[in-house]
Image (spheres, coloured by chain):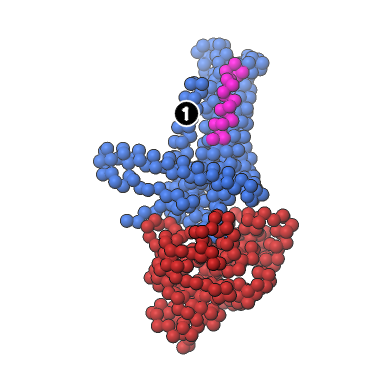
Amino acid sequence: MRDVQIRHPDIVGTWRVNGVNWRIEPGDFWAVGGLHWSGKTNLLLTLAGVNLRARGALSLFGRELEALNAEEALRERLRIGLVFGGDGRLLPDLTVAENVALPLRYLRGVDDKAMETRVRQVLDELALLDAAAELAGAVDLACRRRAALARAVILEPEVLLFDQPLDGLDPRQRAWWRDLIDELHAGHALLDSRPATIVVATEDLRLWRDRAGQFALLDEGRFHVVGDREAMANCDHPLVRELHLHESTKD
Amino acid sequence: MESDTPTIGGLRQPDATAFFAPSRFGFLTRQFLTLSQGLYGLGRFAFLTVSVGIAKIFRARNVVWSEIRRQVLNGGVRQIPIATFMALALGFVVAGQLHVLKTVIGVKSQTYAGGAMVTVVIRELGCMAITLLALARNGAAMVIELGAARVKGETMALQAAGVDPIHYLVVPRVIGQSLSVFCLTFGFNALATASAYLFMYALGFTLPLGEYLDQLSTYLRPLDFLFLVIKPALFGAVVGCVCCQQGLMRPTKLEHIASATTTAVVVTLVVCVLLNGLFVGLFYLI
């Protein structure tokens, strides 16, 4: 991203994040910290290629998005998977399995048998087989969040963006998610054992200080790249203290 | 000043009405501009829908067709009982009115039976009644469903997953509504025509079935058959298009959905009445 300004998706003429200059290398593990309503979701949406840019340039895998035609841009975008927080933003009138299968059916047009095999494999890996036939609107938050992950990994992307993946989950679920994200970063069967590039947006950097390799902050509409763990430990940005990173380290 | 303006599909509607002072002239001008803007926005949305539908006609056919089937099931098949009831009731009303006429002009009133059915039911009321049914039973639900999907970010999630919301959510709804209204109108007209005859028979008319059918064929013009296909299909598409537009473009908060639903009902009625006027004009010009 070069000098990117991210606009508000619904309110014309307003922007959420400004001056984003950010380069993500293959194999990176980024944690982006920001307070509530700081524009984390819009940043990830922009990174995933959903056009929320008011200005600036976005390159995906070294290719300028503007220079690509619609088909090429879509192909590059599909190399990135976005896992939404909250209720996972699934379609509530489809079952969990149908939600997970949707990108595969829509974009790849694979036959029913191949699709069923892949969906079953992903659901099995994420312990979702029991909920597969339930409507997405009827399952609990943890299931919905896992189903959102399943939908994001079904096309085997190279980059995974997580929007507050631990928000609202109990300690057991949190541990499961953090371990799984580590495994995805190292190489997991879900992604054909290829190491994934990870970006996690969070309101609580403590949970990622020992896992992420690079850190960035979103503060008052500005994006700040902090650097690696050492740079983060020495960072004197007030937001770092607000996100409890330093106090917690002392604890 | 901030304004909540929709952005799905890159469409925006500028608020030109804000320039006019709150005088009587200003009020009328604002109303006219609001209507013009609404119709312009609807036209752009319809154009976008048709463009996407054509451009992606061969993409994800199994997904889109299964959505169309679902829409036809909800918007057509599940409305058969209420449409049947309405057709029987309308047939009874026409037969009842002819019976009232019979008390004034005598047995001659039964010579108007076929004409009344063609001019009142087949040409006008059948299509309009089914359109209203589709609007009330499906259109309003569609605005709420899509409005909630937009507010909760589900449409954005579809975009992020590479699924085009216009292609996946709007195109099947417009096609599904169009097919549903067309099929229901066809059945409605046939059933209302049959039930009118049965009720007339029950009310003591001595009109032979052959003569009733002769009357119907006398009043029906070749253009009627063309309009019987085009009008319901178009009205159904209008229901789908307006309701999808209001659902996907307007609500940015949950509390906006109620007003979007009301607007969808009003806009659909206005557009269908205007189109109906156009069809009447064409019918008598050709």
- Give the magenta range: B216-234
Question: Can residue B86 be seen in the rendering of this structure?
Answer: no
Does A143 appear above or below B133? Answer: below
Question: What is the x, y in percent for residue B72?
Answer: 62, 42
Q: Residue at x 40, y 67 (%)?
A: A18
User: Chain under label 1?
Assistant: B
Mark 1 lies on a secondary structure that is helix
Q: In the displayed structure, would residue B82 be above or below residue A150?
A: above
Q: Which residue is mark 1?
A: B278
Q: Which residue type does callout 1 highlight?
A: Leu
Magenta-drawn stretch contains B230: yes
Residue B227 shown in magenta = yes
Which quarter of the figure has residue B22? top left
> Based on the displayed image, in which of its 4 quarters is residue A192 positioned?
bottom right
Which color is chain A depicted in? red
Q: Which chain is blue?
A: B
Q: Nearer the viewer, residue B156 or A191?
A: A191
Q: Is residue A235 visible?
A: yes
Residue at 48% across, 34% down? B272
Task: Find residue A139 and report its horizontal and vertical position in percent.
Answer: 61, 62
